[in-house]
């Protein structure tokens, strides 16, 4: 299981504490130091069944600075995935990837349902 997170993110810290508390093994990955690649994001997006917009950190400063709220609707999926692959701070976190399961963000009830 791959846990992709930003250590200073309070939601990521809660998710990590939850995983540790439930003794769930994972490989930790810093989202800025090892930004997800286009291929990884494309695979996770299609595996998750979620809308691509869910993979964007819409509350992040970079998202707002780039005015992506207005730009994303006119961009192709490929261009959106390429953009996400340029900077880990654009990607919603934490991400938990385990084979056929991809969890975006931390919602405790959702994680319990999928992992316990």
Image: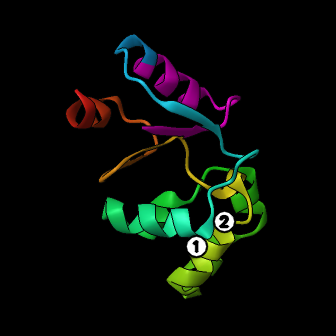
**Label 1 CA crowd tier, 10 Å (few <14, some 14–19, many 20+):** many
* Whether label 2 touches label 1, CB < 8 Å: yes
Most distant residue in the top direction: 21
Which is nearer the eye, 46 or 70?
A: 46
Which of the image's four quarters has the N terminus? top left
Q: Is residue 13 located in the magenta-colored stretch of the structure?
A: yes
Residue visible at 71% across and 60% down in the picture: 64
Which residues make up the magenta segment? 1-19
- Which structural element holds mark 2? loop
Residue 84, quarter of the rendered image: bottom right
State how far apart marks 2 and 1 are (Cα): 6 Å
Relative image position of residue 99 (x, y in whole percent): 34, 50
Q: Which residue is mark 1?
A: 81
Which of the image's four quarters has the C terminus? top left
Relative image position of residue 12 (x, y in whole percent): 56, 31
Residue visible at 66% across and 57% down in the picture: 90
Residue 69 at least partly seen? no
Q: Which residue is mark 2?
A: 85
Left or right: residue 74 versus residue 61 is left
Left or right: residue 52 versus residue 93 is left
Q: Is residue 108 above or below residue 29?
A: above
**Label 2 CA crowd tier, 10 Å (few <14, some 14–19, many 20+):** many
Residue visible at 61% across and 82% down in the picture: 79
Q: Is residue 33 located in the magenta-colored stretch of the structure?
A: no
Q: Is residue 69 above or below residue 103?
A: below
Q: Is residue 10 above or below residue 88?
A: above
Total residue callouts: 2
- Which structural element holds mark 1? helix
Q: How is the image coloured?
A: rainbow
Which is nearer the eye, 76 or 38?
A: 38
């Amino acid at each position: 299981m791959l846990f992709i997170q930003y250590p200073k993110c309070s939601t990521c810290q809660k998710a990590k504490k939850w995983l540790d508390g439930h003794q769930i093994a994972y490989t930790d990955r810093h989202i800025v130091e090892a930004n997800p690649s286009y291929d990884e994001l494309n695979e996770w997006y299609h595996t998750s069944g979620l809308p691509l917009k869910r993979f964007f950190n819409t509350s992040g400063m970079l998202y707002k600075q780039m005015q992506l709220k207005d730009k994303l609707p006119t961009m192709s999926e490929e261009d959106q995935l390429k953009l996400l692959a340029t900077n880990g701070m654009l990607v919603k976190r934490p991400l938990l990837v385990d084979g056929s399961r991809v969890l975006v963000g931390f919602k405790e009830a959702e994680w319990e349902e999928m992992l316990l």
